[in-house]
Amino acid sequence: MNYWLFKSEPSDYSYDDLIEDNKTQWEGIRNYQARNFIRDRIKINDKILFYHSNISIPHIVALAEVISEPYPDHFALDKTHKYYDPKSTSDNTRWFMLNIKPVKKLDNIVTLESIKNNPKLKDMVLVNRSRLSIQPVTKSEWKIIIDMSLS
DNA sequence: GCCAACGTTGGC
DNA sequence: GCCAACGTTGGC
């Protein structure tokens, strides 16, 4: 079982959207490092911290869970789609996606500011390589975030 | 809306 | 294979 942090801009797709949909496909990952996590490391039942980015108070809002194996991101082949990638072909899929479902909202959101202010979280990828849209989270980081959400 | 950080592209 | 140019992300 592994832990991850998925970022989403709430104006694009928020956790409430995920609740409404009951599940969703996490398409549009166009970064190789994130792609490799999806393709090689992320497994069914892995746990996700759902992060809202690009807003006035960036924060972790909820927990989600992986519910599918990785599969080719077919949006990369759709010329009319915003995630179209001219270098992808049906023989050679550069990009992958998977499905996730909501688990539960945190009692309290955990803000980026509070994460940065917590010395125990100074090694989090979120703090050090903030632009990566899918990030590994350690078990101890996961526990600390959950604790912070309860207080 | 600015801009630093950083990933990608493509000419050489 | 280097690196300048460029595009994107996302915090502020």
Image (cartoon, coloured by chain):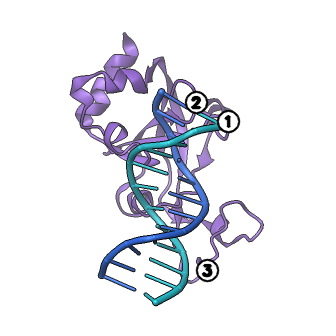
Chain colours: A purple, B cyan, C blue
Q: Residue at x 26, y 30 (%)?
A: A121
Q: Which mark is residue A143?
A: none
**Does residue A31 appear anywhere in the picture?**
yes
Vertical arrangement, residue A134 with respect to residue A142, above or below: below
Q: Which residue is mark 3?
A: A90
**Badge 1 element:** loop
Closer to us: mark 3 or mark 2? 2
x and y, in percent, of residue C8 in the image: 58, 54
* On screen, residue A57 above or below A75: above
Callout 3 secondary element: loop
Q: Earlier in the sequence, mark 3 or mark 2?
A: 2
Question: Label 1 neighbourhood size at 10 Å, few (<14), some (14-19), many (20+)?
Answer: few
Q: Chain of mark 2?
A: A
Q: Which residue is mark 1?
A: A11
* Identity of the residue drawn at 38% across and 13% down: A150
Q: Quadrant of the C terminus of chain A?
A: top left
Q: Quadrant of residue A101?
A: top right
Contact? badges 1 and 3 (CB < 8 Å): no
Q: How many marks are shown on the rendered structure?
A: 3
Q: Is residue A27 left or right of residue B7?
A: right
Residue position for label 2: A55
Same subunit under labels 3 and 2? yes
Tell me whether the residue at label 1 lies in contact with that at label 2, contact meaning CB atoms closer than 8 angstroms.
Answer: yes
Residue at point 67% right, 67% down?
A84
Q: Amino acid at mark 3?
A: Ser
Q: Is A20 on the left-hand or right-hand side of A148?
A: right
